[in-house]
Image: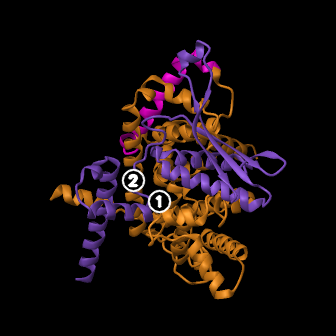
Amino acid sequence: MLLTSKIISFFETPVNTRQLAYFRIALGAFCILKILILFPALNDYYGQYGIIQWAISKAAIGPYLPHLGDLSNFLIESFSISATTAFYTIFISYIFCLLSLTFGFLTRIMAIICWLFHLAWMNTGGAFVYGVDVFTQISLFYLLFMPSGKYLSLDILLKISKPQKTSLAGGMTKRVFQLQMCIMYFSSGVEKVSSVQWRSGEAIWRAVMMPSFKQFDLTWLSNYTFIPFTLGWLTVLIEISYCVLVWIPKFRVLAIFSVIMLHISIGLFMGMWFFSVVMILISLFCYGEECYEDIKKTLSKYNSPFLIKIKQIHKKRLLGKALNS
Amino acid sequence: MIRYLRKVVIRSAIFLHLSIVIITVSHLHEKVYSNIFPALNNLYSAYTNTNRCFGFFAPEVYNDLSVNMTAHSDSTSKKYLFKNVNFETRVRLYSLMGHFGENYDTVQMSLFSRSWALKIFTEDPKVKSVDVKVDWNVIPTMPQYLKGQRIQHSLFYSTHFDAN
């Protein structure tokens, strides 16, 4: 009974709506950047006669999943417009919805539309999908259950919804998201440690040597095999320990800092900047507030005698000035 | 009563969601001999993306693939390159080639290469035929690299398409 109530209270912890709003804004802005960076090649990657034609990407998904082809056909039939106009109308509508989500206008509805839109883009460009799309979709999915428009939003400004300080639904969703991240990093770490490549450091070597990702000439690493070996094990260690360390206040900052550094390295050495940013963004949402509290606590503990001394000196000076005058 | 039911539904949904995620990442779903569960699991994954096997270059970092296409018209032959404008399109093209070689599925390879050829034919009506050649970039291990071995390009897939 005690365990059940502990589990329930673990999940049913309210969260500050400020956190949810920051996550909404960051995710919305990220999605806008993610689609805008592809704009110069948008038609090649997502267009009807692009690198992978719609007929192929549509056949690869189930009939129940959204696809830009369906939306485009609907627009063409309804408004008698050309296929290109329909495609760019969808693009502009998506940007508009993302902007609305970012600014918190009709937040919940926009969260649903953006989630479906993102899914449609993913299904259309299925051949180009990688981690960044998967984690953006996961984030948008969790955002559906969060009242993210209850703080810093146009909804409040226009009195569409009332401001709210804390949210139980938001807290529960955040908890599930935290657990999802733990499960994800742990499983990824276990998969890595089961492979000889990761245990010997060859995986790091191969990742930086692959022509598709090569950013710098790191061939000199072959002379210092202990570097890829250490980095390989460090990656495994960071991923496996994440699920434990983030729940221990003493080590939480270290765990999040390590994960952030890991993703910055992925961006720097493999050029996967968007993937790195979304992973950092998720980690900061999941544990950022807790880390901030941990840092504040630690600082107040270590700085208190120092601060007291400064205050005493300041008081003495003020007293001296008053006496002199 | 409604409040109680709502609580039960939410708690059950969370339990079910996390169970699906754990079952998938631990590969337990592959051991379930049922037609319904994999179908439901795939459907849930397709919408939420939460229940996937998150590997991140695990267990292995495989050799990457690079594509070379040549478009032949009556008088000339020229190389065709996919639009690669920034760091993000570079990663996207890597993903494309990863999906191309996924599970060594020849049907998928044939579909992809047909799609590429069709794009070239659509862009330039003068093109009569297209050659598609996909190379595997075989990366040497660190000791092999020290012995003088370098990245080798071995043929992974090749095909030819005529406009007619």
Q: Amino acid at mark 1?
A: Ile
- Main secondary structure type of the part rendered in magenta: helix
Q: Nearer the viewer, residue B100 or A325?
A: B100
Please report, as a chain letter, where disc 1 is located.
A
Q: Is residue B63 above or below residue B76?
A: above
Please report, as a chain letter, where disc 2 is located.
A
Q: Position of B80 compared to B13: left or right? A: right
> What residue is disc 2 on?
A180
Label 2 – label 1 distance at C-alpha: 10 Å
Helix or strand or loop: what does disc 2 sit on?
A: helix
Q: Position of A187 compared to A21: left or right? A: left
The 10 Å Cα crowd at callout 1, few under 14, some 14 to 19, many 20 or more, is many
Which residue sits at x=75%, y=58%? A40
Most distant residue in the top direction? B147
What color is chain A drawn in? orange
Location of residue A5 by image quarter: bottom left
Q: Which chain, by letter, is purple?
A: B
Q: Is residue A184 above or below residue A159?
A: above
Which residue sits at x=44%, y=67%? A62
Give the magenta part as a residue range. A220-248
Which of disc 1 and disc 2 is earlier in sequence? 1
> What residue is disc 1 on?
A138
The 10 Å Cα crowd at callout 2, few under 14, some 14 to 19, many 20 or more, is many
Q: Amino acid at mark 2?
A: Gln
